[in-house]
Image: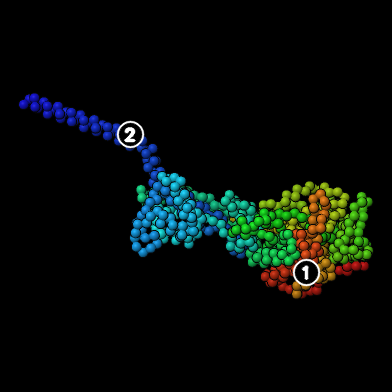
Amino acid sequence: MTKTLRNRRLRYSVVMIAVIALVAVFVVRLVDIQVVQADELSKAAESKRSIPVTLYGTRGTIVDRDGTALAESVVRYNITTSPRLVKSFDGKLGGTRVKEISVDQALSAIATASGGDVGTMRKNIAADPKSDFAYLVKGIDVAHYEAVRALQVPWLYPEQQAARSYPTGAATGNVTGFMGTDGAQAGLELAYQKCLAGTNGSETYERGEDGVQLPGSTVTQKRAKDGGTLVTTIDSDLQYMASQDIADAAQQLKAESATATVVNAKTGEVLAVADYPTVDPNDVDATTDPGAYGSRALTAAYEPGSTIKAAIAAALIDKGLASPTTQAVVPYSRTFPWGGTIHDSEFHPTENLTLTGILRDSSNVGITELGSKLTTQQRYDVMREFGLFEPEPAIDYPGQPTMNYGASPEWDKQTDINSMFGQGILTTAMQVSSVYQTLANQGVRIPLHMVKGCQTEDGTTIDAPDVQSKRVVSAAAATQTVDMLQSVVTGGTLVGMKPISGYNIAAKTGTAEVADGAKGYGADRIISVAGMAPAEDPQYVVTVTFTKPQTTKWSSGAAPAFRTLMSQVLEKYRVAPSTTQARTYPSTW
């Protein structure tokens, strides 16, 4: 009996020791899991169920002067999946009854609904079958996204993102520029990246083993911030008209390229800046000419030709060295002591012309005879004050020529002469517009600008241009020059242009030779017209320029496009017709 009791006690002791040992093992393991490895295991568990999501800050909108969107962000969706969860499931897949849906059936339905490719989907899933992320299709619109969502495939996860859309397309593509896979590529999109770019945020949510998001588990880590709204001075309707006008004219002239600008003479606001050819930012790959990615009106430097003569005439009057009726004896050609020669565009006998007649007939010889009354420095300074020799200071646009001219001209004697009729110097079409805005505004230059400012998310306006005005020539000098330019239309190089009924027009033609490298000037020309209306109180300035036209080499070939665009401007803005006759001065003596 005693022995039996001892055996029982022994067995009991052994069992107790075993139980205590087992409990000790569990306690040690529990301490190891809950204390020693707690942080590591917690993070590992969370990483398996916590899903990070990027919150995209929407890129800001570019709008015209009336708020019409020129560039805007639209919602697009990426469809993603967790490859380790991809398997057959019970569902309707867009049908009416529940059935077992295979992976192949699901992928085929997703491809049909989204416009995606089944092969690409299979490849992305197979790349890492145990992963939690893979793209199935990218960048689908809302309609396609809704079609995919209606399939109710449990292992699909949408990812929202913003894409860029350009409602006015090619008409304003030269202004807005466009976005690429690496961000902003051209135009205002690139120039105002800081204004337009949104700031991305982030959030996380948790999902169960079946891949379904757990309700109420979303936590925002960082709030997304939308980009600002870039407000331009562009009138999108007028921009479309200008684009159509110069495209039609360029094709008729068989020109290599063309530009058109419309400026409010009183404010310096650029209402339209059109280019041909241009880029459709919705389909950039369709444009094969890299020069069309931006705006040649702002970036292409060329010798302006006779449009510059108006600036020389205004400077002569302003300095008291001439008047509209100052007389000059003007032969067809002129030879200088250093051997250089200039001549007028058409042969003529020696003529007795006034300054008005010199502008009317666009005489190179005449403008140099009178223009030489100004010193080289005076001519250089006044051209610079009119807006030449420097990028447009109030226009932020990539690709503008630097034009780092010094305080004094560094040109030879021949260039000194040639500069008076726009040869040997470089300008852009927008700079020529600036010259005529100054004349139209009674000698006061307002820096041309095509952006009003950037309205940030909190309502603050930033990036407003500096448009401080500056007097270049006296009001009398500007007015008399404008009056002289009416003779160009009524009896000069634009006499063949059909009048714009009811309006006095002041304008000047330009025909510039195109340099051919070391060969000098070739047969190609750049033809242009710059002008304003109504001449007695100019409201708007219009320029048109055509590079290397083939059907004509004469500046009069640009006149129809100028007339069409100026007529549209006057009609659109309901400018009151002229109530006085065109003021002209004697052209000969």
Residue 467's spot in the image, x, y percent? 69, 56
Q: Is residue 571 above or below residue 102?
A: below
Closest to the observer: 558 or 82?
A: 82
Quadrant in which the C terminus appears: bottom right
Can residue 355 be seen in this snapshot? Answer: no
Q: Amino acid at mark 2?
A: Asp
Q: Is residue 3 above or below residue 384?
A: above
Q: Residue at x 44, y 47 (%)?
A: 126
Q: Residue at x 74, y 63 (%)?
A: 254
Quadrant in which the N terminus appears: top left
State the SS at label 1. Answer: loop
- Between disc 2 and disc 1, the foreground one is 2
Closest to the observer: 41 or 219?
A: 41
Which of the numbered marks, if any, corresponds to residue 505?
Answer: 1
Q: Amino acid at mark 1?
A: Ile
Can residue 2 be seen in this snapshot? Answer: yes
Closest to the observer: 534 or 199?
A: 199
Residue 558's spot in the image, x, y percent? 76, 65
Residue 206's spot in the image, x, y percent? 39, 48
Residue marked by disc 2:
32
Residue 205's spot in the image, x, y percent? 41, 49
